[in-house]
Image (spheres, rainbow, N blue to C red):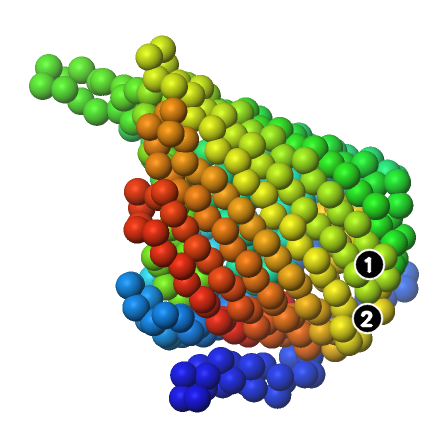
Amino acid sequence: MKRLSIISTILIAGLATSAPIFAEEPSPAAGDSDQPKLTIKPSGRVLLDGALFLPNKNGFADGVAIPDVRIGASATYGKVSAKIDIGYGLGKISLKDVYLQYTPNANNFIRGGYFVQQFGLNSATSSAMKPTMIATTSDSYLNATGRNLGIMYVHDQGPIFLGVTAFTPSTTMTTSPSQQGKISVGAAERFVWRPIRDPGQVVQVGFSSWYQTAEHTATTNEDGETVTSPGFFKYSIGFPTKVESVPMLSANIQNAKTTFRLTPELLLSKGRLALEGQYYYMNVSRDAGFHNYTAQGGYALLRCLLVGDSKYSYSHADAGLATPGPKSLECVLGYDYMNATDIKAGINGGISNDYSVTFNYYINKYLIARLRYSYTNVRASDATFPRHENIIQARIMFKF
């Protein structure tokens, strides 16, 4: 019972706070000039997590953590907007969203900078707003919704949603071109068809693809000449928790040339129920003499509103379900599978299965409390020995 105090303390702290902390900004007074005005809005969030691990051994220890603290601001002037977001988590400071955006009308925009590109249904929600509390293993392993430096065009009108991005990976933010030797570049797209998108009833299918050249590193040899390494890709992920960092899947693919990924998506909603799912396939082409590397996985989520809202709403701008309203309690059943092992390629990335149930209580527009249980097993992985883990986690999130 003492171990459960980690969870109960966090939940009680969040549930005790139900009133908004910040007042709404006043509307412009009548008669104000029609000229564009500079509007600046601060933003931020804090996550507080607690976790219990069963069996409590082999690198896991019960505890608490603050995995993410964000502070930032967005500015708007006419059709031009900008955003900057700085995060701190687990002892590291990092840039999050940093971009400029031009919005000529309500149906189109162009964004340039450092951001999450449109690729699959998971890109419709930020990392802290995942209904399963922790991002799915399949999406995280492929870094499918990680941030990259690039330019993106989005069209959102009627039943059609389209996002197209040209990018270079996040390593460009920390490594100069001379250190890379040869810069990796890529393109991604997401196409969505949503013939029904009414409150309480949604039917949506989509397809995303991704193409990217390999990453490289550059070194200087004894003669002072710059030597560029063969191409490579690295993929890795730990067990689904932010309290501990225990490796689960990992693949270091050498002599790589390009990678191609695709993911079909499905979203259905009727009243209090919703079904979400994606399938992922990735192929990494390699130089002659090395077998191509393939990986695949997918997830399915069954969501249900138990209290509060009686139906799910749709978010056009994200092409996904909107966050349920205040005082709503949601239950999410999830299954996630990832096969990162390719025997022919000689890479034992690992095979994982994750079963989860998550309860989300949307206290108000500023506070969300989450409670999650998951059972995860992994095998055929060079990153760890065959193992399984039961994880009970709770989170309080404050955002503005």
Q: Looking at the picture, tell me which residue is in the foreground, 379 or 181.
A: 379
User: Residue 133 in the image: x percent, y percent?
Assistant: 57, 62
**In the image, residue 3 above or below residue 355:** below
Q: Are marks 1 and 2 in contact (CB under 8 Å)?
A: yes
> What's the amino acid at mark 1?
Ser
Q: Which mark is residue 7?
A: none
Q: Can residue 326 be seen in this view?
A: no
Q: Residue furthest left?
A: 222
**In the image, residue 71 above or below residue 188:** below
Helix, strand or loop for disc 1: loop
Q: Looking at the picture, tell me which residue is in the foreground, 95 or 270.
A: 270
Label 1, label 2: how far apart the Cα atoms are: 9 Å
> What's the amino acid at mark 2?
Asp
Q: Name the residue under label 1.
A: 313
**Count of all numbered marks drawn on residues in the image:** 2
User: Residue 349 in the image: x percent, y percent?
Assistant: 38, 39
**In the image, residue 346 above or below residue 320:** above
Residue name at image x 53 percent, y 47 percent: 337
Q: Mark 2 points at which residue?
A: 309
**In the image, residue 307 above or below residue 161:** below
